[in-house]
Structures are given as C-alpha cells and as structure tokens.
Image: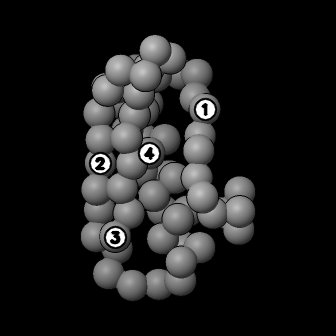
Amino acid sequence: MAGGVVRDDQGHFLGAFVMNLGGGSITHVELMGILQGLRCAWELGVRKILLQTDSRAAI
C-alpha cells in the first residue's frame, strides 16, 4: 500500500492518493508511491515540488 498528500506552499490540502501495490520490496513500493505522487501533483497543476519521504533508499 502506498499513499500521499499534495499540499500547496501554504500547507493547504490539494489532493491525495492511495494505491494497493499487492507486493514487492519496500523500496519498490516507495518508488511507486513517489511516482504516483508526482503524477497526482502534475494533474493538479503543481509544477514546483518539494518531495518528502522517509525512505533513504528511494532517494
């Protein structure tokens, strides 16, 4: 399971996502979550992005 929240520069909620990935390594799930978060932000019109994750391996 992967999920995330998209906020503007003031911290206001713009959108969120959650996805069931079934299985795979923790790093794979983190990377898929990051990719989906970037897609979600792009669809919401966000072009300047600050990405935060707790996965050092995914960075």
Question: Are the residues flagged by discs 1 and 2 in contact, CB closer than 8 Å?
Answer: no
Q: Mark 3 or 2 closer to N-term?
A: 3
Q: Please, what secondary structure does the residue beneath circle 3 have? A: loop
Question: Are the residues flagged by discs 4 and 1 in contact, CB closer than 8 Å?
Answer: no
Q: Mark 1 or 3 closer to N-term?
A: 3
Amino acid carrying label 4: it is Gly
Crowding near the residue tagged with mark 3, few <14, some 14–19, many ≥20 C-alpha atoms within 10 Å = few
Crowding near the residue tagged with mark 4, few <14, some 14–19, many ≥20 C-alpha atoms within 10 Å = many
Near-viewer residue (35 or 54): 54
Q: Mark 2 or 4 closer to N-term?
A: 2
The alpha-carbon separation of the residues under discs 4 and 1 comes to 11 Å
Question: Are the residues flagged by discs 4 and 3 in contact, CB closer than 8 Å?
Answer: no
- Give residue 36's position: percent from left, percent from top: 42, 50
Q: Against 23, is 21 above or below?
A: above
Q: Please, what secondary structure does the residue beneath circle 1 have? A: loop
Q: Mark 4 or 1 closer to N-term?
A: 4
- Give residue 21's position: percent from left, percent from top: 34, 73
Q: Which mark is residue 50?
A: 1
- Give residue 10's position: percent from left, percent from top: 46, 15
Amino acid carrying label 1: it is Leu
